[in-house]
Image (tube, rainbow, N blue to C red):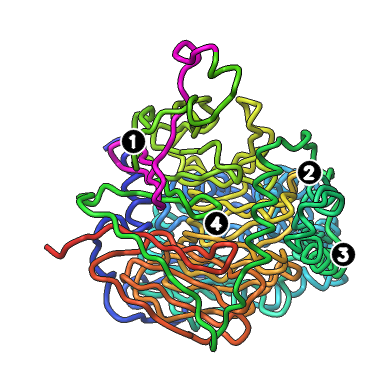
Amino acid sequence: MDRDNRNEKSVLDKRGYKRTQEMGPARTVLPLNEYVGDREINSRLSVRNVTLVDPSGPIDSGYAKLRQWVEDSLDSFKNDLNNLMFPVFIHLYLDMISMRRENEALSFMNEYKEDFIEVHASELRQIEMVREMSNLKENQLAMAFISNKYHLTMGKYAFDLLIDFLELNGMLKIGKIVNQYLNIKVFTGKMSEDIVDIGLVGVADFDFNKKPITSGVHYISPKVEELVLTEEQYKYEYLDQFLGILKKKRLEHAPPAYDRIPLPSPSASHIASEIDKLRDLAKRMNVGKHQMPSICCYTVHNTFETLCCSDYSSDLKLVALGYTDSYIEIHSLTDENLLKLKQSIYLKAPEMRTGKADDARDDVGKVVRLVGHSGPVYAVKFFANKRFLLSASQDSTIRLWSLDTYSEVAVYQGHFFPVWCIDIASNDYYFASGSSDRTACVWSVESAKPVRLFASSLSDIMCVKFHPNSNYLFTGSCDFKIRMHDLQDGELVRLFVDHKDAVTCLDVSACGKHLLSGGKDKTVILWDIATGKKLFKYTGHEGFIYSVSFSYFSSLIVSSSSDNTVRLWDKYKGDLVATYYTKSTPIIKAVFGYRNIISCLGAYTPKK
């Protein structure tokens, strides 16, 4: 089986598209010093064996080989092994300093520190201050590494592979570090929720979670704001009054300058879509525990397990479906049929002069099929103006489709492996993609090449989401982490760590202050973006989380799962408010519309 097929099978299993058996027996956690029966780690990798190492030889012997082995490991346990590399790196550096090999230590630090700068920038700055033996006792962090054990968790299979690798390659120096300075909690099955202490407990700190960010939201572009306040017609709809409310919210949390990232002048269709959004938000229902939202559930029949993805248009009148058979379907959810713009050669001169829309368009019914991809379609996304659609596929491409002519407009090529996810910024100009090649790309619709490429993930990127102010991008990965990048300079500004399995879906609140994530670990987590800290963890689902969504300016959130349920949660209390069951229909998409009406969709999957 080639690499593409292995990657697709692995990630499709993580998304829950194929039935898998439950993993292993009940969870068991053992401290490293108790897990020595059949491995005999204390005798094999004892400190006394280090006397066999030539003291005049290179101290970092084997580190490069271990690093390459971890990099080539399978994704299922690479995350566990990656956590090992930082403490090993630090202790090798400190050993070189203690043996008065300062030049060798400096060279070692400069060669490998980029591997850890993303997460451990603060610690590296402090450790780099140790340049000679006399600095050791003066450096508090260095003494903390020497005096305390570094806490790690590792699956039993990954731990067995590590010990075998160290033994077979005679890496006694690294074996000493593992035995003397690391406290590895080995678990079988799935990781326990009780395991939360990672690193030097009370010492390690994600300093980039303290980087200043501006999470305020404009809500409406300056051009639309000007139109609403000056045009007479909008006063009769009371949009100017609602706009005043939004301006007060904006002043409470000042957003970045609207043109902080380069933007073209908004198109007429984008301005119209923003005004429609403003109308819907003004008419929204305030939902909560005592005022439940309406839910529209759409069931797709006879898919034979080929439905991969779906998305709703901003007004919830259209839905797009992507299939493993490489085509896309556009469905009308109203009584109105879909209209396709005629080719110019079929338009008569009088029709061109009058410009009547009905004369220039053909009725194509309730469903239109788009064909162009050469592999399964894993993601689809409507633009806010409803004139275009994006799709991503196993064929490594992203395609732009016109919803006026229902034809392909552009192909974006930049990934080398299947593209799992896409999202479009609120300005309708930038969009993002995440791939099996472990990168996330940011594109502009006018360029065939990415304008930003983020390669900080250790595994496949399963979901991407723009912040409502379009200045930041969130990525969720199979390495269990969520990253927040600044689009202007490409820097990582936040890291969210608490999921115990792949992150499958993301959403950001309309106010821009909160992040919602769901994962293969069957949990939904609410995060505070400003601090990067977890606020609530919502548990109750019995399957992978497919979709999460915030209500607009209300207290409810919604999630859907492979367990055939849609669940509503109280955003501020963390309580389960309601559970809605379906008949053999995993809901792959559940979203709040601007009026706080929930729309959800799934494919009926009869039991075999």
Sequence order check, earlier mark of 1 and 4: 1
Q: Quadrant of the C terminus?
A: bottom left
Q: CA distance from mark 3 to mark 4?
A: 40 Å
Q: Which residues are magenta?
A: 321-349
Q: Residue at x 52, y 44 (%)?
A: 382
Q: CA distance from mark 2 to mark 4?
A: 20 Å
Q: CA distance from mark 3 to mark 1?
A: 64 Å
Asked if the residue at tag 2 contacts the one at tag 3, i.e. Cβ–Cβ closer than 8 Å, the answer is no
Q: Which residue is mark 2?
A: 488
Report the label total: 4
Q: Which residue is mark 1?
A: 327
Check residue 56 for magenta coloring: no
Q: Is residue 580 left or right of residue 445?
A: left
Q: Quadrant of the N terminus?
A: top left
Q: Position of residue 477 (x, y in %)?
A: 52, 55
Which mark is in front, 1 or 2?
A: 1
Which secondary structure, mark 1?
strand
**Can residue 122 be seen by looking at this rendering?**
no
Query: Dot 4, how many residues are within 10 Å of its Cα: few (below 14), some (14-19), or many (20+)?
Result: many
Nearer-the-camera pick, 92 or 129: 129
Sequence order check, earlier mark of 3 and 1: 3
User: Which amino acid type is shown beneath numbered disc 4?
Assistant: Gly
Asked if the residue at tag 4 contacts the one at tag 3, i.e. Cβ–Cβ closer than 8 Å, the answer is no
Nearer-the-camera pick, 380 or 87: 380
Which secondary structure, mark 3?
helix
Which mark is in front, 1 or 4?
A: 1
**Can residue 579 be seen by looking at this rendering?**
yes
Q: Residue at x 67, y 44 (%)?
A: 272
Q: Which residue is mark 4?
A: 476
